[in-house]
Image (cartoon, helix red, strand yellow):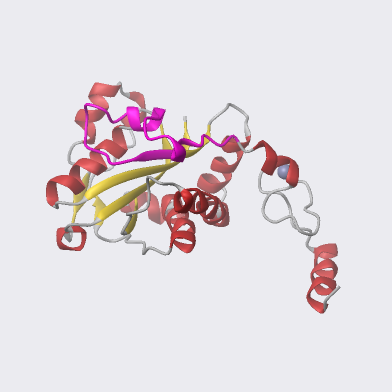
Amino acid sequence: MGIVNIFSDFASLFFPKLCAACNHSLVRNEHFLCTTCRMKLPFTNYHLTPDNEVAKAFWGRVQVENATALLHFHKKGIAQALLHKLKYKGRKEIGIELGKLAGYQLRDSLFFKEIDIIVPVPLHKARKRKRGYNQSECLAIGISEIIGKPVDSSSLIRVLNNSTQTRKHRYERWENAQGLFELRSPKNFEGKHILLVDDVITTGATLEACVQSVIEASNAKVSVFALVRA
Ligand SMILES: [Zn+2]
């Protein structure tokens, strides 16, 4: 046992590290999630199959090269618990750790090999100010750490606030989503393959608008990643 282990055991007497999902104390060699929760992570494994449910959400709507989500959503399930803490409890590190898990999948997938730039779906300025961070950017940072591609959080911006959007139907949402995003520096994306990163995909309307604004402004290719498929 090294000095570092003795010290971290000592420190954890006073500051026990907790599982990010179930809040039980972690034992040595457990990191971020306890073994039980880690085994229960509801992986979609969509990164292995191009014709998956997330990809299908874009069919006939907008050109997306490849699309995947890391986890399935179940009510009161583990993905919901993690997402809630990431979005509303200031737990940025959950985004980074899950981003890293996603990064390993993307790195080993045949379908995400040609990504050049990782772009988090931007929050509106006011919302980011309130939350203090963009949860999708945390995911992007984690992915970047593993696949070794840069994150660009400034070229794509959100121009309107869409807080009422969740109450609308899909068609109205698509309409509403138009003009939601703006690519400020299209040159940065010219000829590049962009990986758009979001926390949740439901109908795909927000991501669709995002992809649209990137494609319209530059000749970039776009693939899509979401943490959770709801
Ligand atoms: Zn746990």
Left or right side of 137 for 192: left
* 92 displayed left or right of 62: right
- Percent x, y of residue 79: 57, 37
Q: Is residue 144 depicted above or below 164 in this figure?
A: below
Region rendered in magenta: 42-68
Left or right of residue 36: residue 119: left
Give the residue at x 29% y 32%. 205
Depicted 40 relative to depicted 191: above or below: above
What residue appears at the point 32 percent right and 61 percent down from the top-left corner? Answer: 152
Q: Quadrant of residue 58?
A: top left
Measured as percent of width and height from the top left, residue 144 is found at 43, 60
Q: Is residue 132 visible?
A: no
Q: Quadrant of the N terminus?
A: bottom right
- Where residue 225 sits: x, y (%)? 40, 44
Looking at the picture, tell me which residue is in the foreground, 120 or 51: 51
Number of labels in the image equals 0
